[in-house]
Image (cartoon, grey):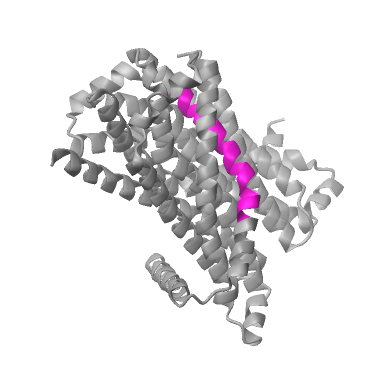
């Protein structure tokens, strides 16, 4: 039974999805967090002439939406595109048919390791992105907006619960499932020829980005009853 | 080192393209054709994404503002946040997944199947015929798409505020004129212009200089997506920071 999961292959995929995307994800997410905190300080000053709540407000937005969605979109266009291109090349060079001939089911051989790997790596990446985001928000609000460290932590404690972190990990896991499944679907339904590979890659990136946003909306709506 | 080399090559490529604009050396018909193609292909996607993102932002803002009892500000804050920040960023991300990948795959396939060399042999200028119209079309149509996306995300916000927060549309729009002023809209379009330039440069550069067969085209597409997103995020930060500094000096003086 365990043999079906092909643990070494999953490990290899985790290396491709999580480890190789890590620098890009952390870099982008840190900048996005900085922008969020700047913008929310702008809005708070405009709405209630007082930006003392900014760290908590921005950190809440970061934990609930920003870090996990930006991470998932980046992984989609890097690893999701890679996976779709790989699977569609396997399809058009008839490797998938060869697998079927050998009595191996393509979904258990190709999809399952990628599914496990992308769920695990999205959870890991989301956790890292969340902490990195909070760190860069901390840094900007300390240096540029002039909040002391204590003020930042205090405002964080008032607004954020551990639940927020766990729910964002759950979102990450769902997005991982979406990315791997959509890439597999478009890869397996690829038309012949080099043109087909390009088309199926583009379509899989577009479809998974849209699905990520729509599912994020649905999950956000469901989670809003838990807060 | 290779990063600096390709950065320099990209800048040289961009100045070459800008030289064509300076001399007005491009065919207008081709540009319009490309604009129509880009807008038609991405309008549905950007407006769907815009609708759902507006809805998500409204849910989060409702939850947060409820704690202060400041739900009346919901419409103004959510609209302003969408216009200044989320709208341009989202449109650029979606476009880089769709149009960026498509253009760089198209140009890359032309390069590795030697169609670009064939054009050169026929005495045509491949940059003038292929790259310049696509470059201009991506920039111009990103404004249309930003418009669609913003309208749809405001609609999504209104819709969700009605269902989730129980706020009527009149209430929702009450503070919008107070919060969204001309500066925000200018900032939004400025951001969109910058992102579109980054996207167009990256996808035409990596596509045009792709090498190594079908595998090379795939590599060019992934590279385009990653580098475009990194560039967009950095440009987003720089514009927001500059806008913030300008605002502070204006307020203080």
> In this picture, is A154 found above or below A7?
above
Main secondary structure of the magenta stretch:
helix
Q: To which quarter of the image does residue B194 belong?
A: bottom left
Residue drawn at x 57%, y 50% as measured from the top left: B97
A222 or A9, which lies in front?
A222
A147 or B238, which lies in front?
B238
A55 left or right of B25 in image: left
Region rendered in magenta? B38-60
Q: Position of residue A29 (x, y in %)?
A: 40, 41
Residue drawn at x 43%, y 54% as measured from the top left: B193
Q: Position of residue A27 (x, y in %)?
A: 38, 46
> In this picture, is A17 found above or below B35?
above
B132 left or right of B191 in image: right
| Residue B155 magenta-highlighted | no
A122 or A195, which lies in front?
A195
Residue drawn at x 68%, y 37% as measured from the top left: A112
């Amino acid at each position: 039974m365990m043999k079906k999961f092909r643990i070494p292959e999953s490990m290899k995929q985790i290396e491709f999805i999580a480890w190789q995307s890590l620098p890009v994800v952390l870099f982008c997410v840190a900048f996005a967090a900085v922008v969020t905190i700047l913008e929310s300080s702008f809005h708070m000053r405009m709405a209630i002439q007082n930006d003392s709540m900014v760290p908590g407000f921005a950190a809440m937005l970061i934990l609930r939406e920003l870090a996990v969605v930006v991470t998932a979109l980046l992984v989609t266009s890097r690893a999701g595109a890679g996976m779709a291109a790989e699977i569609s090349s396997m399809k058009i060079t008839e490797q998938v048919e060869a697998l079927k001939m050998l009595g191996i089911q393509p979904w258990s051989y190709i999809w399952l390791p990628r599914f496990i790997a992308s769920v695990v790596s999205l959870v890991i990446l989301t956790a890292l992105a969340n902490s990195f985001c909070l760190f860069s928000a901390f840094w900007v609000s300390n240096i540029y907006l002039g909040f002391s460290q204590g003020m930042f932590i205090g405002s964080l404690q008032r607004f954020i619960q551990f639940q927020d972190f766990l729910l964002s990990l759950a979102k990450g896991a769902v997005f991982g499932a979406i990315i791997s499944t959509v890439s597999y679907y478009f890869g397996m339904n690829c038309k012949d020829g080099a043109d087909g590979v390009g088309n199926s890659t583009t379509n899989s990136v577009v479809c998974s980005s849209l699905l990520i946003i729509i599912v994020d909306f649905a999950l956000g709506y469901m989670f809003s009853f838990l807060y | 080192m290779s990063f600096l080399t390709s950065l320099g090559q990209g800048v040289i490529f961009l100045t070459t393209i800008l030289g064509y604009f300076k001399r007005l050396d491009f065919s207008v018909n081709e540009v319009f054709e490309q604009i129509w193609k880009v807008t038609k292909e991405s309008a549905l996607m950007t407006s769907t994404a815009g609708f759902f993102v507006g809805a998500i932002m409204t849910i989060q803002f409702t939850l947060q503002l409820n704690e202060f009892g400041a739900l009346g500000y919901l419409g103004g804050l959510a609209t302003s946040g969408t216009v200044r920040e989320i709208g341009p960023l989202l449109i650029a991300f979606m476009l880089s997944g769709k149009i960026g990948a498509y253009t760089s795959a198209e140009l890359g396939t032309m390069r590795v199947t030697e169609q670009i060399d064939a054009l050169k042999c026929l005495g045509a200028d491949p940059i003038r015929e292929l790259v310049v119209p696509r470059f201009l079309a991506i920039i111009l149509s990103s404004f249309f798409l930003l418009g669609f996306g913003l309208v749809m995300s405001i609609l999504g916000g209104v819709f969700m505020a009605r269902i989730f927060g129980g706020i009527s549309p009149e209430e929702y729009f009450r503070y919008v004129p107070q919060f969204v002023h001309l500066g925000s809209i200018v900032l939004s379009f400025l951001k969109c212009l910058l992102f579109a330039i980054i996207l167009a440069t990256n996808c035409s550069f990596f596509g045009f200089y792709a090498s190594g067969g079908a595998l090379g085209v795939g590599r060019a597409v992934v590279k385009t997506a990653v580098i475009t997103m990194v560039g967009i995020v950095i440009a987003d930060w720089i514009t927001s920071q500059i806008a913030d500094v300008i605002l502070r000096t204006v307020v203080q003086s």
